[in-house]
Image (tube, helix red, strand yellow):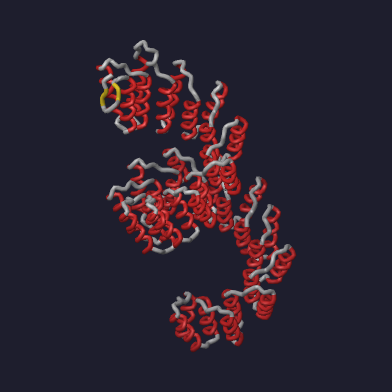
């Protein structure tokens, strides 16, 4: 037979070969036009012709053309018996839809396939199951899985890998292990893809040891890990800060001639950045460039963000210039890094300029970028600009998620522009469910404005939305009630929570005892403490120190000393913070000898004093006009390597001023200013009053 295009025969096989070539090159329409040539030559297209073209159109995302071909095939009959759509035809279309997350269209084709009496195979089922999983429709995926098993279609490693991967991504570790067991029972061999999914998923679920064991199992199966497997292992080790382990894995990759790719190196760089090892991170950047592995937007974004957070602005700017020089376009990761840094420094004019310049240069900021900009503008007091950003988010159809909504809510609350009902209406408008941050922000605003009834109402409404109050919620409401003098209501609330298994914390203990101390009665303070303990408060060092501090603040040093003894009996050793609280209590009670006795005991017990210890002793000495002790304290303080700070000078200037020694007071004041310290307002006032006399 005559040939064309080289050695390709002008028969159906030859035409199919050419069509396949066009499809692989992405020139599917050219392949489609060859059908006309086939018909002119008297060659009829067969099922392979149609399947190749349908698959080609699916690969380039032209589903309308693919479906039209499918319809033509169903309506065309040449009597050959090969023209009707088969399971490959349908599976190609189903697979294409699933890859584009068009799950409903894929299901419609699947139903059509079944209705036409064509049996689906494991590939068809696996495609649809994966599509359902990507859409978060686990229940339907499970039903289809059970249906395929009932119909005698055995799931393969691809089916199981998709299910295992989904379970792990959704923190259903035991379900993933159950699927793994089913694979063993069915005799399905584990391949590198399955192991990689398990390693990656276990790391992301915090199951580090099991993930590392899984990697060892992979090696015991005599499987060869690929770059993706090593990247999952490296990423997991980076997340837990095991950079030494990362180095070992990189060495192992080199020994096995597995070349790291941009994902591998980006994970390593991000790990070093998170561990504060910027120099090592930058060295990896130069290493990957030397190996012709080009960094991407994420690589540079991570590095620039790390440098900015560490205050290394020049290094960040240098990396930014290097990024542009290498042809990596400005991107949302880098924009976010610079915006966050400018927000932190309150430089929102510069942040706005950067944002607009980025848009002018063709960058399309995402929701995270807009949220950070809006949040920063609100915090900088630029409410008008922040509200314009909110309008832009809506105008550009970027849409609000709950994080963006909370940023807007927080800004509006600070302006006093809110009522609870309008906020719930706003949530419904954006089809959002309030989260902890939403309720916590609302409760905090109500407490700040003294609207405690509203705060309690919102607290109760949380439950109707299926959001359980968390530690932050409890702290906010407890503090709000206590600051308003509603300590009894706060205790009722805490008691209600303790019954449901939510126990008071050291922070709540501090809040309640601070409110109780307003009574200036030791019995009330101790009673509140005991009630919190009965509610399940864990007696730790922080709790004991807080109780001692509160009692000492009220000059109840005898009670505080009893608590110290109880603390020791409970197995907790007094540290610098504990001693400082007791020494301060004795100084306030004018028991200077007891304060110095405690200081001596502190040294005997090898508890190191700090600058605060000496400032307390200096304050006690000057208040009791025991100026003879001041020079001894300063000498000992300097011998131990402590340099006077701003508080030290404030105490000394005030102390000498109070006893009328203006000369020494002025000398110390001048020394303080020379060393760059700014005196407290009370110190200024004392000096001014002295000179006015």
Relative to residue 519, is residue 422 depicted above or below?
A: above
Res. 591 visible in picture: no
Q: Residue at x 50, y 51 (%)?
A: 255
Along the line of sight, the residue nearer the viewer: 406 or 259? 259
Relative to residue 206, is residue 645 depicted above or below?
A: below
Residue 371 image point, x, y percent: 40, 49
Along the line of sight, the residue nearer the viewer: 349 or 257? 257
| Residue 280 located left or right of residue 496 | left
Res. 354 image quadrant = bottom left
Res. 162 visible in picture: yes
Along the line of sight, the residue nearer the viewer: 385 or 302? 302
| Residue 390 located left or right of residue 588 | left
Relative to residue 362, is residue 569 depicted above or below?
A: below
Quadrant location, the N terminus: top left
Along the line of sight, the residue nearer the viewer: 478 or 450? 478
Q: Residue at x 46, y 77 (%)?
A: 677
Q: How many marks?
A: 0
Residue 652 image point, x, y percent: 53, 82
Residue extending furthest toward the right: 569
Res. 635 image quadrant = bottom right
Residue 251 image point, x, y percent: 50, 54
Residue 55 image point, x, y percent: 37, 27
């Amino acid at each position: 037979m005559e040939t064309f295009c080289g050695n390709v025969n002008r028969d159906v096989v030859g035409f199919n070969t050419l069509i396949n070539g066009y499809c692989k090159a992405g020139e599917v329409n050219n392949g489609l036009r060859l059908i006309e040539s086939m018909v002119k030559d008297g060659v009829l297209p067969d099922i392979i012709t149609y399947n190749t073209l349908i698959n080609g159109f699916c690969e380039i995302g032209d589903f309308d053309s693919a479906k039209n071909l499918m319809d033509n095939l169903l309506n065309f009959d040449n009597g050959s018996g090969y023209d009707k759509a088969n399971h490959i035809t349908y599976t190609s279309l189903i697979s294409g839809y699933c890859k584009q997350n068009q799950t409903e269209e894929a299901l419609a084709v699947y139903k059509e396939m079944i209705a036409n009496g064509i049996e689906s195979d494991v590939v068809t089922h696996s495609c649809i199951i994966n599509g359902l999983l990507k859409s978060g429709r686990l229940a339907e995926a499970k039903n289809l899985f059970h249906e395929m098993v009932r119909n005698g279609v055995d799931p393969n490693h691809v089916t199981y890998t998709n299910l295992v991967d989904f379970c792990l991504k959704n923190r259903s570790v035991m379900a993933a292990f159950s699927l793994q067991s089913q694979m063993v029972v069915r005799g399905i061999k584990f391949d590198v893809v399955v192991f990689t999914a398990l390693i990656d998923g276990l790391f992301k679920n915090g199951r580090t040891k099991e993930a590392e064991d899984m990697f060892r199992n992979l090696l015991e199966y005599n499987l060869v890990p690929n770059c993706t497997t090593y990247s999952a292992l490296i990423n997991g080790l980076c997340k837990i800060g095991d950079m030494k382990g990362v180095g070992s894995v990189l060495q192992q990759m080199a020994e096995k001639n597995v070349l790291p790719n941009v994902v591998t190196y980006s994970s390593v760089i991000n790990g070093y950045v998170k561990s504060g090892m910027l120099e090592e991170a930058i060295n990896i950047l130069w290493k990957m460039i030397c190996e012709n592995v080009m960094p991407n937007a994420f690589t540079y974004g991570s590095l620039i963000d790390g440098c900015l957070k560490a205050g290394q602005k020049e290094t960040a700017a240098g990396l930014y210039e290097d990024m542009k020089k290498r042809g990596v376009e400005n991107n949302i990761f880098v924009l976010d890094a610079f915006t966050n840094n400018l927000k932190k420094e309150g430089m929102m004019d510069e942040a706005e300029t950067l944002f607009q310049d980025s848009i002018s240069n063709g960058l399309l900021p995402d929701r995270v970028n807009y949220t950070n900009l809006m949040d920063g503008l609100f915090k900088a007091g630029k409410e008008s600009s922040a509200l314009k950003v909110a309008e832009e988010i809506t105008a550009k159809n970027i849409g609000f998620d709950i994080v963006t909504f909370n940023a807007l809510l927080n800004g509006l609350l600070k302006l006093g522009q809110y009522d609870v009902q309008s906020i719930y209406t706003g949530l419904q408008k954006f089809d959002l469910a309030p989260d902890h941050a939403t309720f916590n922000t609302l409760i905090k605003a109500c407490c700040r404005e003294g609207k405690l009834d509203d705060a309690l109402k919102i607290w109760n409404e949380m439950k109707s939305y299926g959001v359980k109050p968390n530690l932050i919620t409890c702290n906010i409401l407890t503090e709000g009630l206590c600051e308003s003098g509603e300590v009894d209501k706060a205790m009722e609330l805490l008691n209600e929570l303790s019954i449901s298994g939510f126990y008071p914390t050291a922070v709540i203990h501090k809040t309640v005892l601070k409110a109780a101390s307003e009574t200036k009665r030791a019995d009330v303070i101790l009673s509140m403490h005991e009630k919190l303990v009965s509610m399940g408060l864990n007696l730790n060092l922080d709790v004991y120190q807080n109780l001692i501090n509160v009692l000492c603040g009220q000059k109840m040093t005898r009670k505080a000393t009893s608590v110290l003894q109880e603390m020791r009996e409970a197995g907790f050793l007094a540290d610098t913070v504990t001693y400082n609280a007791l020494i301060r209590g004795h100084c306030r009670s004018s028991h200077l000898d007891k304060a110095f006795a405690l200081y001596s005991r502190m040294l005997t017990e090898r508890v190191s004093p700090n600058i605060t210890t000496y400032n307390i002793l200096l304050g006690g000495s000057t208040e009791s006009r025991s100026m003879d002790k001041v020079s001894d304290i300063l000498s000992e303080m300097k011998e131990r390597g402590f340099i006077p700070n701003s508080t030290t000078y404030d105490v000394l200037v005030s102390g000498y001023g109070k006893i009328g020694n203006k000369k020494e007071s002025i000398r110390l004041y001048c020394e303080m200013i020379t060393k760059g310290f700014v005196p407290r307002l009370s110190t200024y006032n004392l000096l001014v009053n002295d000179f006015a006399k």
